[in-house]
Image (cartoon, helix red, strand yellow):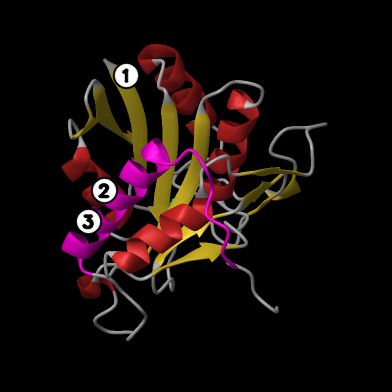
Amino acid sequence: MQTVLLMGFEPFDQDPVNPSWEAVRQLDGVQLAEGVQIAARRLPCAFSTVGKCLTGLIAELRPAMVIATGLGPGRSDISIERVAINVNDARIPDNLGEQPIDTAVVVGGPAAYFSTLPIKAMVKALRDAGVAASVSQTAGTFVCNQVFYLLQHALVGTDVRSGFIHVPNLPEQVADTGQASMPLVTTVEGLREAVRVAWSTEVETVQSGGQIS
Ligand code: PCA
């Protein structure tokens, strides 16, 4: 049996829930193809502990593909991230009260890593399935970007594909602000399709996912 490791985050910034974990937990055990199963795991939202957790999961599960997900407050669609950068610059403290500013994720590491997932094929498949999705050019500079960078750093040179997806808030999280949101059922279906396509796509789709600025 091969494993696709799919991760979501614990709540942060005083939110009682994190839709990334609420969604991926529903996909735990889902069979993607014959002999391929999703294992869903939750990550801590803390700069100092999340790396150990990530490498521990990779060592334990020996996954054939890894996708991490997190909440992107304000995102209006399933955002397939293109690039992780070697910078921590926290606007708010993490769940352990740490707020690194302009530190490296990996001292001496490359400036950035690209996702090794077929990000254009994933966006196309989600849109074809009626789920709003786009390529995102930045995963931010908080814990999600750190995890994305550490993930790509850990798997560079292997044939294990990996990447990161940001998901929107749940409607109930933004009832008082009117920010963008996506119902949980849509996020779950979007992530299921994203993982399925990431697993089964051998040749990336050629289609613009760019932005002017
Ligand atoms: N989102 C945050 C960290 C945890 C999460 O779900 C981020 O985008 O960095």
Callout 1 amino acid = Gln
Residue that badge 1 annotates: 2
Q: Nearer the viewer, residue 174 or 160?
A: 160
Mark 2 residue crowding within 10 angstroms, few (<14) / some (14–19) / many (20+): many
Q: Earlier in the sequence, mark 1 or mark 2?
A: 1
Q: Is residue 71 magenta?
A: no
- Residue 195 location in percent, x, y? 34, 43
Classify the position of the N terminus by image quarter. Answer: top left
Mark 1 residue crowding within 10 angstroms, few (<14) / some (14–19) / many (20+): some
Q: Gap between marks 1 and 3, in whole Å?
A: 21 Å
Callout 3 amino acid = Glu
- Residue 31 location in percent, x, y? 19, 31
Q: Earlier in the sequence, mark 1 or mark 3?
A: 1
Residue 189, disc: 3
- Specify whether residue 168 is in view: no
Magenta stretch in the rendered image: 183-208
The rendered magenta stretch, by its main secondary structure, is classed as: helix
- Residue 162 location in percent, x, y? 51, 36
Classify the position of the C terminus by image quarter. Answer: bottom right
Marks 2/3 in contact by CB < 8 Å: the verdict is yes
Residue in the image at 20% along x and 41% along y:
27
Q: Is residue 120 above or below residue 114?
A: below
Residue in the image at 24% along x and 27% along y:
37
Residue in the image at 43% along x and 71% along y:
75
Residue that badge 2 annotates: 192
Q: Secondary structure at mark 3?
A: helix
